[in-house]
Image (cartoon, helix red, strand yellow):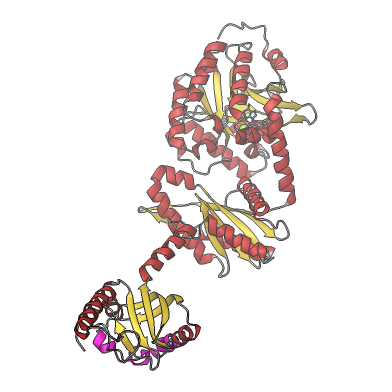
Amino acid sequence: MNKHQLYAAPEGGCVESHGAGLDPAGLELDLVSTRAFLDAVVESIPHMVFVKDVLDGRFVLLNRAGEQLLGLKREDLIGKTDFDLFSPDDAERFRTADREVVASQKLVTIENEPLSTPDGTRSLRTQKVGVPDAHGNPRYLLGISEDVTERLKVEERNRHLSLHDILTDLPNRRSFEAALNHELMNRNRFSLLVLDLDGFKVINDTMGHRAGDDLLRQLSSRLSEVKGEHDFLARLGGDEFGVIHRAATKKSSTQLASRLISALTKPFEVEERLVSVGASLGIVLSPDFGNTPDNLTKRADLALYAAKAAHRGSHVFFEPAMEEKADTEHYLREELAFALKRSQLHIVYQPIVDTRSGRIVCCEALLRWTHPQLGPICPDDFIPVAEASGQIAAIGKWVLETACKEARNWPSDIRLAVNVSPRQFTGFGLAVMLARILERTKLAPSRLELEITESIFLTDSDENVRLLNQIKHLGVRIALDDFGTGYSSLAYLRKFSFDKLKIDKSFVSDLATSDCNLAIVRAIIGLGKSFSAVVTAEGVETEAEHARLLEEGCEQCQGHLFGRPVEAKLIREMLGHSRDRRAC
Ligand code: C2E
Ligand code: MG
Ligand code: MG
């Protein structure tokens, strides 16, 4: 056979034809040029083209792309069968397909047909069709195979990317939702766990996003290691992960939650530093407490909020009462929108005294809300609602303005303490607002004390320290409220120098009998002295507590023993409003 010839000379059949009455020389020329033309066409087809003899299964044609794909010269292939050339399994598969094509007399397409080649297994998209002889009987089998290996890889990669998180390679929210739907459609028993990292934002903000990414990758692989074989773990976004725990019981869900939380307790090495994060988990059992993707995710989130509020590193199961609480909060939020306008808010003032002399030195403004139907609502119930809804900005401004105006009625050596929510620390608006209020109310800035809580250092702490310094520049004092109950790091004490530390009332109660509380109170008083900050004990209720605080050198006290929060009129009387109102 000629080297450039694509196929073996057919023995009769469709390729050759002898028309009567034609000039043999001209016919010969025509045939030669037609054949050369077809050779060139077939040779140029970028996919493997092959022809087999139907009768004996021997190859009669292979083009150049076929040679390249199979890693075979056509002279080594032509005249051979699949069984001479390929593995028995492949050959058997090809032969079965060929028979089906011939029998069907139709074009057959075989998707993703595997083929072992010297370059490894390739995937082919093969189309086969029978070629009849002059009598219409199947004579040859024509096949065209496209190598789709690379295209499939790209498709597979795109599919993977669309279902996985790029950073951690865990399934993403979309896959999670699909897995959740699958469990629900099959009416399976499972639990849905939502895990949220505690303290991740601080690391991200202080060490940079690259470090944050590295941490997320490391902790994702730890979570993958401890999840059960049949559990579906996904990154839902940011620092939130979800797990579908299949065939769940409350006990097995608790065990999984504990494994997930404790997997993160060992510090991570990020950029040659050891960093720690924790995790809180909300869990909802299905079908017991939900059977739609919506109510399950909402309920797992409610349980997560409860876990976060309980204490870091805890897990909480959803209970219907949480939904009732959420409904109440929703109601409160709507009602709170009118509270200011309808004059339902007012401020009471609680004295803070000098521990030694018992003389009032300051009064703390405490907000009250009297709802027409619900009656009095305490700030611990509505302040978080106002914070979550953003209403705290307007309310906080009103409190500052009203309290500063009121303090103008007090003797000039009495300070005013006002609580400020971390949510009011957005941008530099607070400092500007304060300056305006002080100007309008003509209250001396040194008489105003803002009480903030440690949680302010959980978010954008550098920015907040700058803001605190701006406020301090106005001459306003800054007190740290509820000291010791929030953020467990004391590093922020180096970043900002507080004028006052307020010992949380939980450490003051039982002070006379609890050695533990005494040790904490003593330590805070020591810290205050070292940082030149006044220390105030909150929630002083008994003479015994007062005596102990005096002994320990705590400078100021606040609590029912010295006076409950009272209306403005009453505090004025207590302070003796006969003193000069204008002396500020
Ligand atoms: P806080 O700033 O730590 O205020 C002290 C809380 O302890 C007040 O509760 C006060 O009534 C209570 N208290 C005072 N002495 C005693 C005592 O001897 N024993 C006991 N058991 N409690 C005592 P209140 O008024 O319910 O306020 C609770 C919290 O609500 C405040 O804690 C503060 O964080 C927040 N809050 C109150 N008013 C405002 C406000 O205008 N703005 C903001 N952002 N938060 C406020
Ligand atoms: Mg306070
Ligand atoms: Mg407090």
In this rendering, is residue 507 above or below 61? above
Residue 358 or 292: which is nearer the viewer? 292
Q: Residue at x 54, y 56 (%)?
A: 174
Q: Is residue 550 visible?
A: no
**Quadrant including the C terminus:** top right
Q: How many marks?
A: 0
Q: Residue furthest right?
A: 373
Q: Residue at x 36, y 52 (%)?
A: 271
Magenta stretch containing residue 40, yes or no? Answer: no
Magenta stretch containing residue 76, yes or no? Answer: yes
The answer to whether residue 104 is left or right of residue 2 is right
Place of residue 366 in the rendered image (x, y in percent of width and height, measured from the top left): 66, 25
**Quadrant including the N terminus:** bottom left
Q: Residue furthest bottom?
A: 56
Q: Residue at x 68, y 11 (%)?
A: 576
Place of residue 493 in the rendered image (x, y in percent of width and height, measured from the top left): 46, 36
Q: Is residue 196 visible?
A: yes
Residue 408 or 387: which is nearer the viewer? 387
In this rendering, is residue 210 above or below 388? below
Which range of residues does the magenta coloring cover?
Answer: 74-97
Place of residue 288 in the rendered image (x, y in percent of width and height, measured from the top left): 73, 59
Place of residue 201 in the rendered image (x, y in percent of width and height, measured from the top left): 48, 45
Assign the magenta stretch its main secondary structure. Answer: helix
